[in-house]
Amino acid sequence: MEKLDINLHDIKFIFVEKLTSIMNRPIQRVAAIHDLSGFGKASLTVVIPILSTMGIQVCPLPTAVLSTHTRFQGFHLIDLTPHLQTIIDHWKELHLHFDAIYSGFLGSHQQIKIVKNFIDDFNTCLLYTSDAADDLLCVDLGGRRNIKKNNKTKKTKERTS
């Protein structure tokens, strides 16, 4: 067996060079974990074309389908929580890699947990988290929004409209 003549300085240089190239490469693929609103300038309908125009491949993971943005009275929501993990598991089977995550509307504590695990499982960073501090139907959970399901909040929203 031939002895390799590599010193520790060379190994450090190679490591730093590789790390620098990884850190300086542009974001190429983003998992967009957000709702899909049928009406209103928000959600996946906005982020997909913006990121795509920047040359980024956007892989949407819809958390919910809404008839309108949550600022409109009487919106209809279809919760996709039961389907999220199945989609994520399929992406794992395909060995997909994401350079970053764009997170928006999260409709429950369970969805927040799923996104946290997604970040850990795919070993990636959170690029952006939409907030809903001005939306009285939602509560801010560290920048993520969660629909409150109680009538008191709805009555407060109606009085302020």
Image (cartoon, helix red, strand yellow):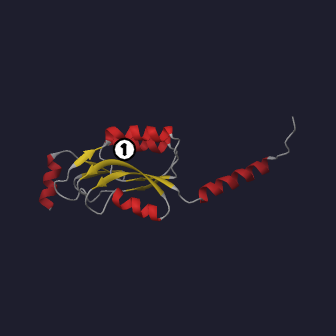
Name the residue: 37% across, 41% down. 84
107 relative position to 152: left or right = right
- Residue 131, given in percent of the width and then of the height, sits at 34, 56
Q: What is the residue that sits farthest to the right in this orientation?
A: 2
- State the residue in front, 148 or 84: 84
Q: Residue furthest top?
A: 1
* Image coordinates for residue 70, horizontal then vertical, percent: 24, 56
Residue 46 position within the rendered picture, expressed as x and y whole percent measured from the top left: 35, 61
Q: Circle 1 is placed at which residue position?
A: 112
Please give the name of the residue rendered at 22% of the width and 59% of the height, measured from the top-left corner.
Answer: 71
The quarter of the picture where the C terminus appears is: bottom left
Residue at the image point whose x is 23% and y is 57% from the top:
68
**Residue 88 drawn above or below residue 137:** above
Secondary structure at badge 1 equals helix
x and y percentages locating residue 160 in the rendered image: 15, 61
Number of marks drawn: 1
Q: Is residue 106 left or right of residue 89?
A: left
Camera-side residue: 119 or 143?
119
> Of the residues shown, which amino acid type is indicated by label 1?
Ile
Q: Quadrant of the N terminus?
A: top right
In the depicted view, which residue is nearer to us: 94 or 111?
A: 94
Q: How crowded is mark 1: few (under 14 residues within 10 Å), some or many (20 or more)?
A: some
Q: Which residue is drawn at 26% across and 62% down?
A: 40
